[in-house]
Image (cartoon, rainbow, N blue to C red):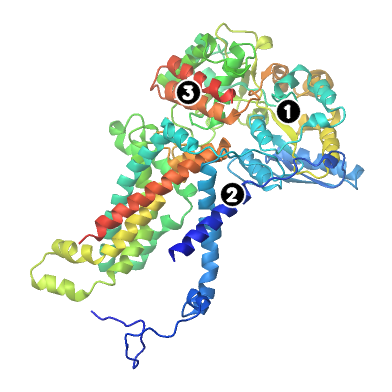
């Protein structure tokens, strides 16, 4: 009996090893030019689905022999997990119109992405469309594995009624410097106008720092990424100031340490929120809102202020058999015409260098989007480095420990996190 | 006490001499080959769903492994105990094991005590027994996500519990308090799973002879003494099962730290090994490190279960 068990165990181990070591051909070189039917995944918000389905319909009408089937990204805890699992299973679609730049290094390492440079004229197309911003999306090997598609540059949204109730000028509340921001926050909470001045999610998910620390750090440093040249950049005076600002917000109860189960801004529990242009459509009817750039230590002009892009991109996945069609569809979906339709349908900013001139009429008719459009030209992306998600998690853990819960001094936490990030970025 | 002769049939005296030697294949198949056929589906299920992934996880934990596309050419070198060294030197992982130990100490004890007491009470209730059984069982069959929403409403900063406690409410509040977050989760899980364990005890209680209670009553034992001297020893096998099952399910804690304390918060005070495995294996793309955590967790659970079994089965 014991021998039988041992034999079975060895057989299973061998089977496991065989499966785990499975190899095959990397990409199919013929696939790069192959055309035919393909599948694409769309983000699961209603506006993007509406745009995506209309775009696919137009394509299919003109290309009956290269039929595109579009569907929402299957349900999962996050889109990135679903896409990662699909890559491993070999059933990823040809294009995903919701590829997070932070996940690209991991997908690339998995062998799940096709370098776009292999398609004729791709590099020129990407760089002409997006301009200098495109550089941030280049992988460390110098190739593009994603096309910069659209951004949601984040800014401070505020509730004018709450500002007024707190005795502040609702049209122009003082929010430009850190001192202004703190003083305004104190007035809001002390007056009882709102439970919180601003309520960023104080939770530990790796991406939460994109909506509290990172926009302010980008603004303070005129567009520095979290990691540059393989080194952490945040363990300096600018990073320290941002961390101290948020630490004060949490310490004084201006920002709660517990997550709000709902929409704190929409339900008027907080006076401000850090959001992208999507918020205009969401809050437009219900909240009398105003918008301001994120604060900086010295109070920079809006026209000079950087912020986090919150971009989502498009990538071609290596499981795709008809990559020629995928590339053509990708160009079609990011054409000036389709970008215009995306802007109109979703309010999100196509990552085009000619954004404001190409769609001047739209911004004329929708002036509330103009500030976001201007901001879109000064955005910072997450760094395209190895171990990207792990780096952000290390940073978030240090931030939670020091800034939100005050267990260790912020300088110590930033310094420790920087050492770990340096190590991860160099792997 | 009766014994059953397994090698001789009735009317066939055991002569003490070995019978004719059966062929090897017949010995492998046993006396009832059809039984193998009946057992095969579940055996196949166990092998594919439990055994294969377990062995694969062990293999992965000794290699530099990451998930890759089917056609990708990747190196997965053997790295010995490197992943285990990385895991054991990671304070986040160590904290998660301490957290889950705290959880188990609270959860398993509460589960055993409450399930046994409530099962005994239910067993003696005459009216409304079905209603009460269903009431206890409902949380067990309800999705955690829905129940977590209720508990957030109860234990949130401005939740009902703090409203009732007023100035006595803890600061920081329950779910963002490093000391209280894990006990709140332990109580939540105890409450949620209690119905299942009550059912186990109810079944065990049916096996205790009523005569034992009558004899105890004749000897002048109080209800409490009867409970301690008749009920508790009478359901000992069920207690072993409850402790082992509660330990195994508790060690696999994931949903509650993920949802109730928003990712193991505050500052990792409620993270669990399985939650860290999810972060490292799925989110961060390091299944090798995650597998090492999983293997260590399996070994810990086996050891704890073994110790519990030995202690509880001791007369």
Residue at which label 1 appears: A150
Chain of the residue under label 1: A
Label 2 to label 3, Cα distance in Å? 40 Å
The residue at 48%/13% (across/down) is A182
Please provide percent x and percent y for residue A127.
80, 21
Chain of the residue under label 2: A
Q: Earlier in the sequence, mark 3 or mark 1?
A: 1
Please provide percent x and percent y for residue B228.
17, 61
Residue at which label 2 appears: A17
SS at mark 2? Answer: helix
Figure quadrant of residue B268? top left
Residue at which label 3 appears: A399
Looking at the image, residue A271 sits to the left or right of residue B162; the answer is right
Looking at the image, residue B188 sits to the left or right of residue A72; the answer is left
Please provide percent x and percent y for residue A193.
47, 22
Q: Are marks 1 and 2 in contact (CB under 8 Å)?
A: no
- The lab-note entry on whether marks 3 and 1 share a chain reads yes
Q: Residues within 10 Å of mark 2 (few under 14, many from 20)?
A: some
From the viewer's side, name the closer residue of B215 and B163: B215
Where A85 sits versus A412, above or below? below
């Amino acid at each position: 009996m014991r021998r039988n068990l041992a034999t079975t165990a060895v057989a299973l181990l061998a089977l496991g090893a065989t499966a785990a070591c499975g190899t095959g051909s990397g990409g199919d070189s013929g696939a790069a030019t192959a055309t035919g039917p393909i599948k694409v995944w769309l983000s699961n918000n209603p506006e993007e689905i509406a745009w995506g389905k209309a775009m696919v319909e137009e394509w299919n009408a003109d290309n009956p022999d290269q039929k595109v089937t579009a569907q929402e990204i299957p349900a999962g805890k996050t889109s990135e997990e679903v896409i990662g699992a699909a890559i491993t299973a070999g059933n990823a679609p040809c294009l995903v119109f919701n590829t997070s730049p932070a996940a690209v290094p991991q997908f690339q390492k998995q062998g799940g992405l096709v370098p776009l440079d292999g398609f004729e004229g791709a590099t020129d197309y990407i760089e002409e469309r997006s301009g200098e911003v495109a550089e941030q999306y280049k992988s460390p090997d110098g190739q593009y594995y994603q096309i910069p598609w659209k951004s949601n540059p984040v800014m401070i949204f505020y509730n004018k009624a709450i500002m007024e109730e707190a005795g502040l000028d609702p049209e122009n509340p003082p929010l430009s410097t850190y001192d202004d921001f703190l003083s305004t926050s104190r007035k809001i909470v002390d007056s009882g106008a709102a439970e919180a001045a601003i309520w960023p999610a104080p939770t530990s998910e790796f991406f939460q720092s994109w909506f509290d620390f990172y926009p302010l750090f980008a603004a303070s440093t005129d567009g520095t990424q979290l990691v540059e040249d393989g080194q952490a950049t945040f363990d300096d005076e600018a990073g320290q100031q941002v961390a101290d600002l948020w630490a004060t917000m949490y310490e004084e109860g201006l920002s709660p340490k517990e997550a709000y189960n709902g929409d704190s801004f929409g339900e008027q529990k907080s006076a401000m929120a850090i959001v992208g242009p999507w918020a205009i459509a969401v809050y437009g009817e219900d909240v009398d809102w105003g918008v301001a750039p994120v604060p900086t230590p010295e109070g920079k002009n809006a026209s000079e202020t950087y912020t986090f892009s919150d971009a989502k991109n498009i990538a071609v996945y290596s499981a795709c058999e008809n990559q020629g069609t995928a590339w053509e569809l990708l160009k079609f979906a990011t054409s000036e015409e389709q970008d215009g339709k995306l802007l109109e349908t979703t309010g999100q900013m196509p990552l085009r260098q000619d954004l404001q001139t190409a769609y001047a009429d739209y911004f004329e008719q929708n002036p509330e989007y103009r500030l976001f459009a201007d901001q879109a030209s000064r955005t910072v992306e997450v760094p395209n480095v190895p171990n990207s998600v792990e780096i952000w998690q290390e940073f978030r853990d240090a931030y939670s420990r020091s800034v939100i819960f005050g267990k260790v001094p912020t300088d110590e936490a930033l310094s420790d996190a920087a050492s770990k990030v340096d190590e991860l970025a160099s792997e | 006490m009766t014994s059953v002769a397994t090698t001789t049939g009735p009317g066939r005296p055991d002569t003490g001499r070995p019978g004719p030697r059966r062929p090897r294949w017949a010995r492998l198949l046993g006396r009832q080959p059809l039984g193998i056929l009946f057992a095969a589906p579940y055996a196949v299920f166990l092998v594919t769903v439990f055994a294969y992934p377990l062995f694969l996880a062990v293999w992965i934990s000794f290699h530099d492994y990451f998930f890759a596309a089917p056609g990708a050419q990747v190196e997965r070198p053997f790295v010995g105990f490197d992943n285990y060294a990385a895991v054991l030197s990671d304070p986040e992982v160590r904290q998660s094991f301490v957290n889950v130990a705290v959880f188990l100490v609270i959860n398993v004890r509460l589960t055993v005590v409450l399930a046994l007491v409530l099962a005994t009470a239910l067993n003696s209730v005459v009216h409304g027994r079905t209603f009460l059984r269903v009431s206890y069982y409902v949380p067990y069959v309800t999705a955690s996500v829905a129940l977590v929403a209720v508990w957030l409403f109860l234990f949130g900063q401005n939740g009902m519990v703090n409203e009732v406690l007023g100035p006595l409410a803890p600061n920081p509040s329950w779910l963002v308090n490093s000391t209280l977050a894990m006990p709140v989760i332990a109580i939540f899980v105890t409450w949620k799973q209690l119905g299942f364990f009550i059912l186990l005890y109810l079944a065990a209680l049916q096996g205790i002879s009523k005569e034992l209670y009558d004899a105890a009553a004749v000897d002048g034992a109080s209800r409490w003494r009867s409970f301690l001297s008749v009920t508790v020893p009478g359901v000992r096998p069920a207690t072993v099962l409850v402790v082992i099952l509660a330990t195994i399910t508790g060690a696999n804690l994931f949903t509650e730290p993920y949802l109730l304390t928003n990712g193991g918060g505050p500052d990792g005070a409620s993270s669990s090994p399985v939650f860290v495995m999810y972060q490292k294996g799925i989110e961060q793309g390091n299944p090798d490190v995650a597998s090492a955590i999983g293997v260590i967790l399996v070994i810990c659970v086996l050891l704890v279960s073994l110790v519990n079994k030995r202690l509880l089965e001791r007369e």
